[in-house]
Amino acid sequence: MKITIKDIAKLAGVSTATVSKIVNNKIDDVSDTTVYKVRKIIKEKNYTPNYLARSMVTKKTKTLGLIIPDIRNPFFTDIAKGAEDRANELGYSIFFCNSDDDLDKEFTYINSLIEKQVDGIMLAGAAKRDRDRERKININIPIVAVDRNAYYKGIKGSIEIDNYTGAYKGVNHLISKGYERIVFVSGPLETKPSMERLRGYKKALKDAGKIIDNENIIVGTYERNFGEKVIETLDYSLKNVGFFCGNDLIAIGLIKSLKEKNYKVPEEIGVVGFDDIYISLLISPSLTSLRQPSYKMGYESIELLIKILDNNNEEKNKKMLKTRLIIRESTNRINLD
Amino acid sequence: MKITIKDIAKLAGVSTATVSKIVNNKIDDVSDTTVYKVRKIIKEKNYTPNYLARSMVTKKTKTLGLIIPDIRNPFFTDIAKGAEDRANELGYSIFFCNSDDDLDKEFTYINSLIEKQVDGIMLAGAAKRDRDRERKININIPIVAVDRNAYYKGIKGSIEIDNYTGAYKGVNHLISKGYERIVFVSGPLETKPSMERLRGYKKALKDAGKIIDNENIIVGTYERNFGEKVIETLDYSLKNVGFFCGNDLIAIGLIKSLKEKNYKVPEEIGVVGFDDIYISLLISPSLTSLRQPSYKMGYESIELLIKILDNNNEEKNKKMLKTRLIIRESTNRINLD
DNA sequence: AAAAAAATTGAAAACCTTTTCTTGACTATT
DNA sequence: AATAGTCAAGAAAAGGTTTTCAATTTTTTT
């Protein structure tokens, strides 16, 4: 049988109230000798308090939920690692949930997390949102949204990326490399990052005096699979085209299919990704991409979440982080301009 | 305030005992009319039981721990996904832990999982083991070991891979392709899979009438970083060498450094990996590798774990899965034999 | 119609903590 | 010496469920 606070109390000849105070370091009104005596017995007997019983009365579980859309995408994997590290440092455990980018699954997970009484949730939401449905869900615990937006009532903070500027930089880079037609291969437009990137794309074209043509905006999913299929759907010739992709997985799929069709990257065609996952460095040609501080995003979102839980969030609850353009082989040709 | 079983009982004019029976579907000795009436009110009020209170009395939390060494390695990521999917299907939640391949961190996590009263643990252990220390940890919940071995007292089952045969197939393939010197680039040898692969490597050499030379066995970590450094440490010329790598990350790092030094893969040098993570398909040259059923490993280990928890494990608690050799560009040269 | 058997229900204990508030014992002040 | 003030400690309630078993009601059998 596991040893309980009663056992300790009996052994020490004190009440459970006293032991409880000592365990939780509320020893202002406990005498030094009692503290010493009880601590010794706790150590001897290797007592640890029962979390369930404690949580019952404190209404805190020291447990968080972590929802990401795609565990196979290293971008989210890095976010998860950052989140886990920080949670661990702060004494929290993490329930892990992978939504497969499916809003229904996300709903189910949120409900199950609430039932398990997590103190808060870190959410990287599914791409396709549904404002009305989200608003209806009854959430009484804090949520911090990371990377992607969401409309739940519980959302109390967010860690975002400056996608607008990022996209602007990426597209601008393609233009400066002399690619003529600039194509945006986007993930679902229901999500804010996608829309912001679209906005940056358009602004960069406009600033360069280029015409915005819907034919050059292709929308799909944030998966490699989509990237591989893209060129099949295009009915114009791929001469001197620059592709700006919604993420690296799409870009990697695209490059794969371009190579199979014997297009020359970067000589004929340029490709820019978004995220800078580590694979981008390994493929050939290596991928020019916009680096996001993914680990940091996870780390800071948990920090923010816990601050909110502790009511210590004097700071703003919205944080925006910057991207950095990492230039590699996939756009690295002699500038034709 | 959240609605409780008492509220339901009062509304229905029955006792909490009756409501409890109905909630848990133990309705053999509850009249149909009562069941109907109570169910209706439960639905109306949207009542869900309090997990903490329930766990207090049942001593089950419907929660499992999942420990993997490296979330950045897609092999373990796939295991985690399989595990999560199966756990979810069976109504369990998962506490996620990343040990960074560090035994101390693994210990800490196990203790914290036990404190949080998980029902069981799925463990893909850190590579370097310590039998004596592990034996000392007091574990009173079941553990299923996946992929890697461990010595904790709590281990009640395992899902393994036939690493011996896998390695044999890989090495044999290199030999049949005419590579002369076969080098084994291994992860830490403290772990059973590594030792089994070494055994397979040796057997394949022996069967081919080749001499086993310790100079050709290089031991490091299961990281890409190690793969990139390997050739710096070799003091023989890399002519017609076949590298058999402990995992794909090592192989990918190795290929990267070979390319940088202008060695021709596969013409001069052949490389075989282990795991067949999806990146192996994307790099250039694409990587010949031994495919492990990683998703399945995670899926089945959770299944086994829960069977053990339910005492339904008539079957053997040890399962061994097979590998499959996937031949790609990194060994695909005209056979010189 | 009475007795026996079966079906249904609920009272109360148990699970292990934390927290509040009262009590009792000292100490300091007048 | 009496009173006020301080300090230390514990009794008891609360948190929400499950489970056991005794009590009651209903049905069946004689």
Image (spheres, coloured by chain):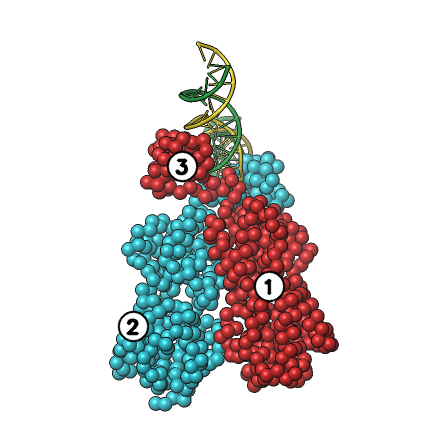
Chain colours: A red, B cyan, C green, D yellow
Q: From this view, report whether residue A259 is shown above or below residue A103.
A: below
Above or below B208: residue A197: above
Nearer-the-camera pick, B20 or B97: B97
Q: Earlier in the sequence, mark 1 or mark 3?
A: 3
Labels 2 and 1 within one chain: no
Q: Cα distance, mark 2 to mark 1? A: 50 Å
Whole-percent x, y for residue A108 in the image: 58, 55
Q: Residues within 10 Å of mark 1 (few under 14, many from 20)?
A: some
What is the chain letter for disc 2? B
Under circle 2, the secondary element is helix
Three-letter code for the amino acid on which mark 1 is drawn:
Lys
Alpha carbon distance from label 1 to label 3: 50 Å
Res A100 visible: no
Q: Which residue is mark 2?
A: B199
Q: Which residue is mark 1?
A: A322
Can residue A335 be seen in the rendering of this structure? yes
- Looking at numbered disc 3 in the image, what kind of residue is underneath it? Ile
Chain letter of the residue beneath label 1 in the structure image: A
Q: Residues within 10 Å of mark 2 (few under 14, many from 20)?
A: some
